[in-house]
Image (cartoon, rainbow, N blue to C red):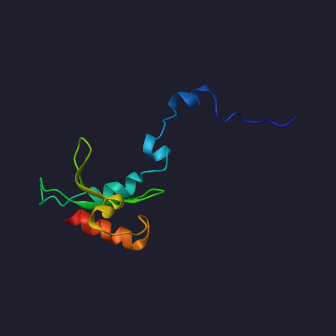
């Protein structure tokens, strides 16, 4: 009988470090996020705004956000469901609705 080395014993599981929750869920790439949020050193205490677009099964959501140490803060948000208030009768998830939602969020 051949010798088989046990790879995962109690010492392995004692030192095992679980990844962050959003990394485990596959929602956040923290390496890309760190590169995106990082600011030049001569621009201290200035905010770096970004447009965050999310597509759900029924609509498109646009948010203007910036990062802080406590967490991201949303400055402005618009949903494609709000386009009905402005008289735009179309699907809420297509390319034109995403464009109009971005304009609405910028306003």
Q: Which image quarter holds the C terminus?
A: bottom left
User: Could you tell me residue 11's position as x and y percent?
Assistant: 57, 27
Q: Which image quarter holds the N terminus?
A: top right
User: Could you tell me residue 95's position as x and y percent?
Assistant: 41, 72
Tell whether 25 sits left or right of 11: left
Q: Nearer the viewer, residue 95 or 25?
A: 95
Q: Quadrant of residue 21?
A: top left
> Residue 107, can we see it?
yes
Q: Nearer the viewer, residue 92 or 102?
A: 92
Q: Nearer the viewer, residue 19 or 52?
A: 52
Q: Quadrant of residue 78?
A: bottom left
- Residue depicted at x 60% and y 26%: 10
- Residue depicted at x 44% and y 69%: 94
User: Could you tell me residue 27's position as x and y percent?
Assistant: 45, 50
Q: Nearer the viewer, residue 59 or 1?
A: 59
User: Could you tell me residue 6's position as x and y percent?
Assistant: 70, 33
């Amino acid at each position: 009988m051949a010798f088989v080395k046990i790879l995962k014993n109690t010492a392995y599981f004692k030192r095992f470090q679980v990844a962050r929750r959003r990394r485990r869920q596959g929602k956040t790439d923290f390496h890309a996020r760190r590169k995106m949020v990082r600011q030049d050193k001569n621009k201290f205490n200035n905010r770096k705004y970004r447009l965050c677009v999310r597509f759900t099964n029924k609509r498109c959501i646009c948010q203007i956000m910036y990062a802080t140490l406590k967490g991201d803060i949303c400055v402005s948000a618009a949903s494609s469901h709000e386009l009905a208030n402005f008289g735009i009768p179309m699907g809420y998830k297509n390319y034109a609705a995403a464009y109009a939602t971005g304009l609405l969020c910028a306003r």
